[in-house]
Amino acid sequence: MNLRIPGPIPVPNNILEAMAKPMINHRGPEFAELLNRVTDGLKQVFQTNNDLYIFTASGTGVMEAAIVNTLSPGDNVLSASVGVFGDRFAEIASTYGAKVEKLKFAEGKGVDPNLIRESLVKNPNIKAVLVVHNETSTGVTNPLPEIAKIVKTEFNKLLLVDGISSVGSIPVQTDFLGCDVVATASQKGWMLPPGLAFLSFSSEAWKAHKVSKMPKFYFDIANYEKYLKIGQPPFTPALSVMYSLDIALRQILDEGIENVFERHFDIAEATRNGIKNIGLELFADKSVASNTVTSVKIPDNIDAKLLMSTMRKKYNIVLAGGQKELSGKIFRIGHLGLCTHQEIEDVIESLKKSLPNCKLAS
């Protein structure tokens, strides 16, 4: 199966095999060595000296952790969204009682940093800005450096970043940009199965944590800090995925993080060029097109369900459909992790063959 969705992604065999190792005591010295080693490796990929914690959770779990550990009910929050996951970030904050001001941008477009500046000028009581760096629902990478410069340098607000599908695939200079919280999850560019999520936490985030009043138990980062000091998790970890994380990090760091970024750019360019060469139109603006997932407009005369079904049943290729309002209007090609040019060429060639047979009845 050529699984071309933006997560879970195909996992290399050597990383899968690492999961077959016997269980160990997660309160013992062997696990402490593993935990400390992978925490250090994750910091290198995050490009941070900030604290970093590993959760047994989905990406949404650490999005929730980012909110509840820094905010209180009634806090003013600015959400800049270009899709489903930006909306989710705002919904989590609202669910816990934050007063969320929403900046919603057209799908396929990126966040306009100038509008963030305008909102922060108009409402100086805003405590935090929420942004998804790479929005997989639309195939857009937001201009995080420009956003961070405004949020941190000009206004000194908390910056909470969903980097779930960008960290490890697209440059995220956590410390250089001043990001206070960055969240990501194992099933994306880390070449891992689902089950783990990672969160970096700055000194400013810790100051916010001290006064935060949102309820938290499983996601209380203070517990993760306390237990990390003794080489343990606060709760039972996804141990098999921890084994695979150890191998994946070694592979990423041996390749060199800049080389990993370049590889993702190259495969994204090949995907975009291939789509255009067979006469299809890209959905995301070129200036903000993601290097981890390519969104493609479905022509008006094409049956979207039949196209997806044909690709899966006839060519063994699984694509991602559009979400919510974009259902039936776009499809998405994931190319995170170790995606080869041959896999993308197979997708393009199969699309070329499928399209003539997937036209709507006139």
Image (cartoon, rainbow, N blue to C red):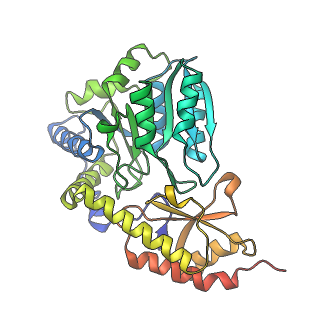
On screen, residue 47 versus residue 342, left or right, reads: left
Query: Residue 292: x percent and y percent?
Result: 44, 59
Camera-side residue of 231 and 274:
274
Camera-side residue of 26 and 46:
46
Identify the residue at horizontal 23%, vertical 45% (top origin).
Answer: 44
Camera-side residue of 333 and 102:
102
The answer to whether residue 11 of the structure is visible from this angle is no
On screen, residue 242 versus residue 193, left or right, reads: left
**Which quadrant holds residue 261?**
bottom left
Query: Residue 279: x percent and y percent?
Result: 61, 79
On screen, residue 247 versus residue 199, left or right, reads: left
Identify the residue at horizontal 63%, vertical 59% (top origin).
Answer: 322
**Which quadrant holds residue 79?**
top right
Query: Residue 344: x percent and y percent?
Result: 45, 75
Image quadrant for the C terminus? bottom right
Task: Specify the farthest residue to the top.
Answer: 211
Identify the residue at horizontal 74%, vertical 71% (top origin).
Answer: 300
The answer to whether residue 50 of the structure is visible from this angle is yes
When the figure is inspected, residue 25 is found, relative to residue 230, above or below; the finding is below
Query: Residue 229: x percent and y percent?
Result: 21, 27
**Which quadrant holds residue 302?**
bottom right
Q: How many marks?
A: 0
